[in-house]
Image (cartoon, rainbow, N blue to C red):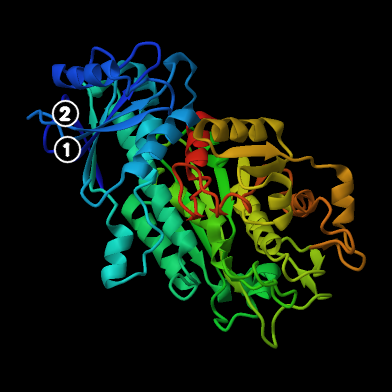
Amino acid sequence: MKISFSKSPNSNIDLLLCPGFSNTGFLNEYNSELKKIFSDLKKNKLLSGKKGEYEVMVNSAAKNLPKKVCFIGFGDPSKLKNSEVRELAAGKMKSLLSKTHKKIGVFIPKNLEKFVKEITEGICLINYTPAKYKTGKFNEKATQNLFDEVVLISGKHEKYKKEAEEAFLTAQAVNETRDFVNAPPNIISTAVFAEKAREVAKQNGYSIKILEKKELEKLKMGLILAVNRGSRNRDGAKMIVLDYSPKGLKKEEYKNPVMLVGKGLIFDSGGYNLKPLKAIEDMQQDKAGGSVVLGVFRLLKKLNIKKRVIGIIPLTENLIDAEAMKPSEVLTAYNGKTVEIRNTDAEGRLILADALSYGVEKYTPGYVVDIATLTGACIIALGDRYAAVEGNDKKLIDALIKAGNKTDELLWEMPMHKEFSEIMKGKIADYRNADDGTAYLGGTMKAGAFLQFFVGKSKWAHIDIAGVAYVDRPKAYDLSMATGFGVRMFIEFLKKF
């Protein structure tokens, strides 16, 4: 897929989308041929500019226009919100996709120039299929509606060309992140994930360290190693450390980077606390947090983000065999603290704990954010439209929420009550990874309380994407399965914070 720009529509475009508005109609910016089509439709009361109300396909005989033109009502432009524009562009486009529509044109009138990012993102995000492993005719059917090019049309596209190109790159990174989350564990193993991270680092000139199992043992990362013990791939535990350090940073900016930590469970069976039917089948998605962090690193250099960013992705599987981690074990974390294992399915917080304490010690970050598909309790509390956010720094949390509101990756702040921290203290060890009897009550907050023990004095926030990373009820610009939730939010956050 590629993006291009044109000052006027032409017959090489397979499908042309023309936005219009309820208060100003379909604007004088359209050429005479488009105006005539609109005039005829309006005269016959077939078209209105009301938001989302009308969608009319027109076969045009005009030589300078595509054979198919679609007018879309955007309502009152003064009342439009970012999320509405993204969903209008994507939703209408999704219903029009066809195997004959390989080159899509979008007219950008003046009233929508400030939303060019949302329009570009929305259209490019729907140009995706999770059916990557189909073959032959099955593959042809799954991919037939994907298009090859989107053309933004305006007499003044120089004003927004850079923003549109950045939105296009961002959408591509989200789609690549979706591929990672959807990929089954026999295709993306910890080794393959690490190799992909190396490729991203090499392509962008980042520093990268991949801590293999022997190094994790030397560092005494007892939590991630314990989770890995049940895996047939005994050497599969890894920790990826990426370092993006753009030129021109001040000394303090370099010394105190932003650190992003993403959970990378290639597959999560739950261990001896085995997940039940309907909860285990899609556990390849448990690497969503790590996939999002890698997705962000696909973009940092391309978008010229002016911050040093450290990305840490702990990788393993959580499986069962004779050596697997068992409930009642006491483990020692990287920071020297001991942890009682009350539930082997509360493993994500264990691998994050080692990653967080390692990153905080090595990089003295100014701000730390971890992201993970961490708790089923988050899905119960917030459903499939909000991720949970909690932490110890209000300024950081507010900035993340603001970024999420802009990208429609919504965050809801959860309380960090001191009693949750007390509950997560152990009976025979320093901490426990789950409480007894009432673990299902406030589970998201308790998981965050556990992680707080491993961030020291750092300004920190935890984002639980359990309900939004992988969905059955997609938004207009998503599809079922992986959403890539968090990539766009993090980029917006890094740009503005």
Per the image, label 1 sits on a secondary structure element best described as loop
Residue 294: where, in percent of width, then height?
46, 54
Describe residue 335's horizontal placement relative to residue 124 as left or right: right
Tell which of 412 and 65 is nearer to you: 65
Per the image, label 2 sits on a secondary structure element best described as loop
The residue that label 2 is drawn on is 9
One can see residue 251 in this view: no
Tell which of 247 and 229 is nearer to you: 229
Q: CA distance from mark 2 to mark 1?
A: 7 Å
Describe residue 247's horizontal placement relative to residue 413 as left or right: left
Tell which of 61 and 244 is nearer to you: 61
Amino acid at pointer 1: Ile
Tell which of 190 and 69 is nearer to you: 69
Numbered label attached to residue 13: 1
Discs 2, 1 touching: Cβ within 8 Å: yes
Describe residue 347's horizontal placement relative to residue 104 as left or right: right
In which image quadrant can residue 328 be found? bottom right
Tell me which residue sits at (69%, 85%) in the image: 323
Tell me which residue sits at (27%, 28%) in the image: 161
Quadrant location, the C terminus: top right
Q: Is residue 447 above or below residue 37?
A: below
One can see residue 232 in this view: yes
Residue 51: where, in percent of width, then height?
44, 24
Q: Residue furthest left?
A: 63
Residue 45: where, in percent of width, then height?
32, 19
Q: Is residue 338 above or below residue 365?
A: below
